[in-house]
Image (cartoon, grey):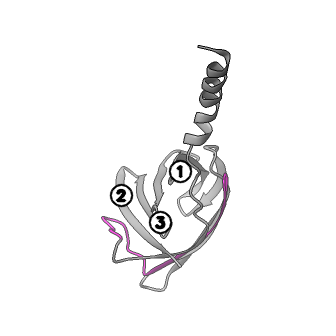
Amino acid sequence: MNKRDFLLLLLLVLLTPSICRAQAADISGTWILNPAKSSWGSATRPFKVILFIEHREPALKYSGTIRYADDETRDFSFDGAIDGKPYPLERPAGKGTMSHQRLGPREIKTEFRTDDGSHVQTVNTTISRDGNTLTRGLEIRSAGQVRRWKEVYDRK
């Protein structure tokens, strides 16, 4: 192998990881729950959910409102990053931490865990290739019970 071939091979080896690494999908926007495409399992079905996301990888900030059929509403929010680090947060289940970890360019795993470990919520969020559908697979382990369901959101 001559010097020129060696340099070309070295350049190819150095550039391949950055070429192959897929860019994280931007999930910024307003998302509306699509109840017809969602499946609720043992979870209480909400009447309406609106989700507002600001995403600048790795920064992630979101807020939203869940409204149930009896007009009960619950607001939620998060301000942190998709970095796998735990961020302090208080949820209806109690005080705890939430972390977001990137699994792939279109998938994020979120975990909320109460400080005493009695409640663990795991969410796998995937955005469609066209960027118009957000799917969240949820699992809650609490009080010896496990509940699972799927939420599908359309970009407004």
Q: Nearer the viewer, residue 80 or 142?
A: 80
Q: In terms of sequence position, does the residue under pointer 3 or pointer 1 come before the other?
A: 1
Number of the front mark, 3 or 1: 3
Q: Secondary structure at mark 1?
A: loop
Q: Nearer the viewer, residue 58 or 147?
A: 58
Q: In the rendered structure, which amino acid carries the disc numbered 2? A: Arg
How far is mark 1 from mark 2, CA to CA? 27 Å
Which contiguous range is marked in magenta? 38-59
On residue 140, the disc is: none
Q: In terms of sequence position, does the residue under pointer 3 or pointer 2 come before the other?
A: 3
Residue at screen point 64% across, 24% down? 10
Question: Horizontal and vertical percent for residue 129?
Answer: 46, 61
How far is mark 3 from mark 1, CA to CA? 13 Å
The residue that disc 3 covers is 130
Graded by Cα atoms within 10 Å as few (under 14), some (14 to 19) or many (20 or more), the crowding at tag 1 reads: some
Q: In the rendered structure, which amino acid carries the disc numbered 3? A: Asp
For the residues bearing labels 1 and 2, Cβ distance under 8 angstroms: no
Q: Nearer the viewer, residue 83 or 142?
A: 83
Q: Which of the 4 image quarters holds residue 35?
A: bottom left
Residue at screen point 66% across, 54% down? 57
Q: Is residue 79 visible?
A: yes
Graded by Cα atoms within 10 Å as few (under 14), some (14 to 19) or many (20 or more), the crowding at tag 3 reads: few
Count of labels shown? Answer: 3
Residue at screen point 36% across, 70% down? 38
Q: Is residue 67 visible?
A: no
The residue that disc 2 covers is 147
The residue that disc 1 covers is 105
Residue 56 colored in magenta in the image: yes
